[in-house]
Image (spheres, rainbow, N blue to C red):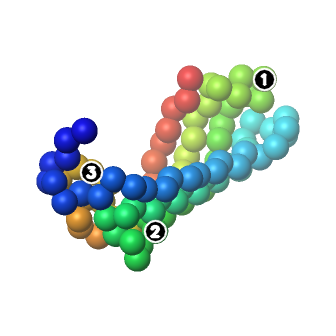
Amino acid sequence: MSRDPTYLERWNFHSGTELRGGKSSAFFRPVAGLDLMWKKQHPGAINTSLKVGLEMGKPALRDRHLRFLAEFYDGYSPYGQFFDEKMRYWGGGVYVGF
């Protein structure tokens, strides 16, 4: 397997979880997600992504929903050539699931 740049470390640990508002019959449900990633390339840092908000949709159609989320990220950039740059941001988003 080739790496570019060649000094990139191979090992990482990636884990995440998502919590939904249970078996509520409500049209709006709370939802939250946490994603953690440790890379050997940056051993003293854990990249953290947290999203919280509301999910809108019929409970019977759990796979079809619209989410309004606030999000936070703190860690190294997950984007290609910027992997060695530290970043932190707050934001919001609308996500469609189907």
Per the image, the residue denoted by label 2 is 46
Q: Are marks 3 and 1 in contact (CB under 8 Å)?
A: no
Residue that sits furthest to the front in the current view: 1
Question: Which badge, 1 or 2, comes first in the chain's sequence?
Answer: 2
Answer few, some or many: residues within 10 Å of disc 1's Cα (few below 14, many 20 plus, some between 14 and 19): few
Q: Amino acid at mark 3?
A: Tyr
Q: Is residue 60 above or below residue 52?
A: above
Secondary structure at numbered mark 3? loop
Specify the label residue 60 is tagged with: 1
Q: Is residue 59 above or below residue 91?
A: above
Q: What is the CA distance from the residue labelled 1 to the residue labelled 2?
A: 37 Å
Q: What is the CA distance from the residue labelled 3 to the residue labelled 1?
A: 36 Å
Which of 47/56 is in front?
47
Answer few, some or many: residues within 10 Å of disc 3's Cα (few below 14, many 20 plus, some between 14 and 19): few
Q: What is the CA distance from the residue labelled 2 to the residue labelled 3?
A: 16 Å
Does the image show residue 47? yes
Q: Amino acid at mark 1?
A: Ala
Secondary structure at numbered mark 1? helix
Give me the residue at 33% from left, 53% from top: 10
Does the image show residue 71? no
Position of 77 with respect to 43 (left or right) is left
Q: Position of residue 41 (x, y in %)?
A: 31, 64
Residue 98 falls in image quadrant: top right
Residue that sits furthest to the bottom in the current view: 44
Specify the label residue 79 is tagged with: 3
Answer few, some or many: residues within 10 Å of disc 2's Cα (few below 14, many 20 plus, some between 14 and 19): some
Q: Is residue 48 above or below residue 23?
A: below
